[in-house]
């Protein structure tokens, strides 16, 4: 009688060309049109970010650049921002603002 042959193959130590295929890159998420809509900036905020209409995300980035450039973060509590004259106008006269309140106060200066 004939013997049965095994149909399973042994794995070789050498990977094949198919195993080296590059992983498929994920498609980049498109930002929402609402986030990318240019907004007009109030005169108080324009002293910090400029007068050009830009999206809300860019406004927040520019405010953070201003804060870091002028060293306005509280050294002991980094979440707090110590406002100078320009930022006090934006923050409604407050001298210290939490960074989470900051975005809320900035939104009042965008339309």
Image: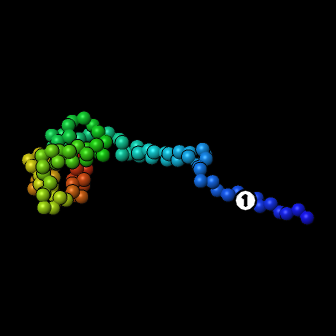
Q: Residues within 10 Å of mark 1 (few under 14, many from 20)?
A: few
Q: How is the image coloured?
A: rainbow
Picture residue at 11% right of the left edge, 54% below the top: 82
78 left or right of 18 in image: left
Picture residue at 9% right of the left edge, 49% below the top: 84
Q: Which residue position is annotated with label 1? A: 8
Q: Quadrant of residue 73?
A: bottom left
Q: Is residue 4 visible?
A: yes
Most distant residue in the top direction = 52
- Labels in figure, total: 1
Most distant residue in the left direction = 85
Residue 64 percent location from the top left of the image: 21, 48
Q: Is residue 111 visible?
A: no
Q: Quadrant of residue 28?
A: top left
Residue 47 percent location from the top left of the image: 15, 40
Q: Quadrant of the C terminus?
A: top left
Residue 91 percent location from the top left of the image: 16, 52
Picture residue at 50% right of the left edge, 45% below the top: 25
Q: Which of 19 and 72 lies nearest the eye of the viewer?
A: 19
- Asked which secondary structure carries label 1, the reply is loop
Q: Quadrant of the N terminus?
A: bottom right
Picture residue at 63% right of the left edge, 54% below the top: 12
Residue 109 percent location from the top left of the image: 22, 46
Q: Which of 62 and 14 lies nearest the eye of the viewer?
A: 14
């Amino acid at each position: 009688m004939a013997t049965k042959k095994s149909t399973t193959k042994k794995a070789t130590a050498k990977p094949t060309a198919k195993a080296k295929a590059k992983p498929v890159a994920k498609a980049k998420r498109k930002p929402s049109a609402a986030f990318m809509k240019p907004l007009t900036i109030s005169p108080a905020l324009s002293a910090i970010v400029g007068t050009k209409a830009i999206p809300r995300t860019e406004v927040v980035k520019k405010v953070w650049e201003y804060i870091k450039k002028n060293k306005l973060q509280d050294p002991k509590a980094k979440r707090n921002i110590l406002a100078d004259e320009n930022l006090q106008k934006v923050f409604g006269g407050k001298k210290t603002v939490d960074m989470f309140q900051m975005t809320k106060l900035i939104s009042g200066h965008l339309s």
